[in-house]
Image: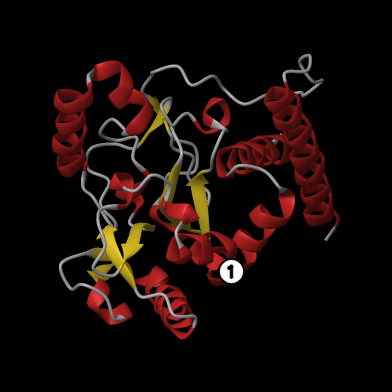
Amino acid sequence: MRGARRGASALLLLLSAAAAGQGAAATGEGAPAVAAPLPSCAVADVPAPASGYGEWASTLLDTHFTLPPDYAPPDLVSTARAGLDESHRLRAVVIDDLAALVEAAGRAGHRLELQSAYRSYSYQQRTFQYWVDHDGYDYALRSSARPGHSEHQLGTVVDLRGAGGAAPWDVDDWAATPTGSWVAANAWRYGFVMSYPHGLEPQTCYVYEPWHYRYLGRAEARAVHDSGLTLRAYLWARVQGAQRAAH
């Protein structure tokens, strides 16, 4: 128990430090006194921390950290099990809470559809190249993940849209639509967190994507929501906490 409490306390301190760091960065204040600040968003191919299949809620992916090409979760199932388009797949652990999210949205008058779900390494190669051809390499680095760096490869991420609507990136601000606004306010209750919120690209490494939600489980999503941190900052704090606990 002492070890568990000590680890929890260390994580809370790291989360507080990360929160201070985010606030200073967002407001343009001086560099905060953070023991292990967020890595820069430099382009690199460093193996991601916590990248085992059982560590799906902790795996940190960005422009810096990557999964191997052969990372493919063994428990992918059709999203038809969540009452959605059968052409997409997600890890089985996501399905029940995704179904609950879709049902709750429907009760509130918002029908949801999937724009995208699991993507393999090779699929992301094609996706990234499409955006390079469309927008140029420099902007594609900000708006699309290179293969191996996409959270979609985890099998626990969804890109959402309103039923019958356009692709969410073809809308000025999907989170400003009635459906997108409801999801932004309520997704965490069902275990989903927006990975790339507005105005925080230096923290997240990617442009605002109000349709991109990563599943963490309800307890962890609440913790991220309550922390006020971006998901990347929260996961980085967990990485640092795990490293300190190991030593």
Q: Residue at x 42, y 79 (%)?
A: 96
169 to 112, vertically: above or below: above
Q: What is the x, y in percent for residue 172?
A: 38, 44
Q: Residue at x 76, y 23 (%)?
A: 35
Answer left or right for 200 relative to 45: right
Q: What is the x, y in percent for residue 178?
A: 47, 65
Q: Amino acid at mark 1?
A: Arg
Q: Which is more toward the observer, 227 or 241?
A: 227
Res. 25 visible in picture: yes
Q: 10 Å neighbourhood of mark 1: few (<14), some, or many (≥20)?
A: some
162 to 241, vertically: above or below: below
Answer left or right for 62 relative to 131: right
Q: What is the x, y in percent for residue 236?
A: 60, 36
Q: Which residue is disc 1 drawn over?
A: 218
SS for tag 1? helix
Q: Residue at x 66, y 56 (%)?
A: 225
Query: Residue reaching furthest bottom?
Result: 107
Res. 74 visible in picture: no
Q: Residue at x 80, y 39 (%)?
A: 16
Task: Indicate the quadrant containing the N terminus: top left, top right, bottom left or bottom right.
Answer: bottom right
Q: Which is more toward the observer, 100 or 61?
A: 100
Q: What is the x, y in percent for residue 122?
A: 15, 40
Colouring style: secondary structure
The tally of labels here is: 1
Task: Indicate the quadrant containing the C terminus: top left, top right, bottom left or bottom right.
Answer: top right
104 to 74, vertically: above or below: below
Location of residue 115 (image quadrant)? bottom left
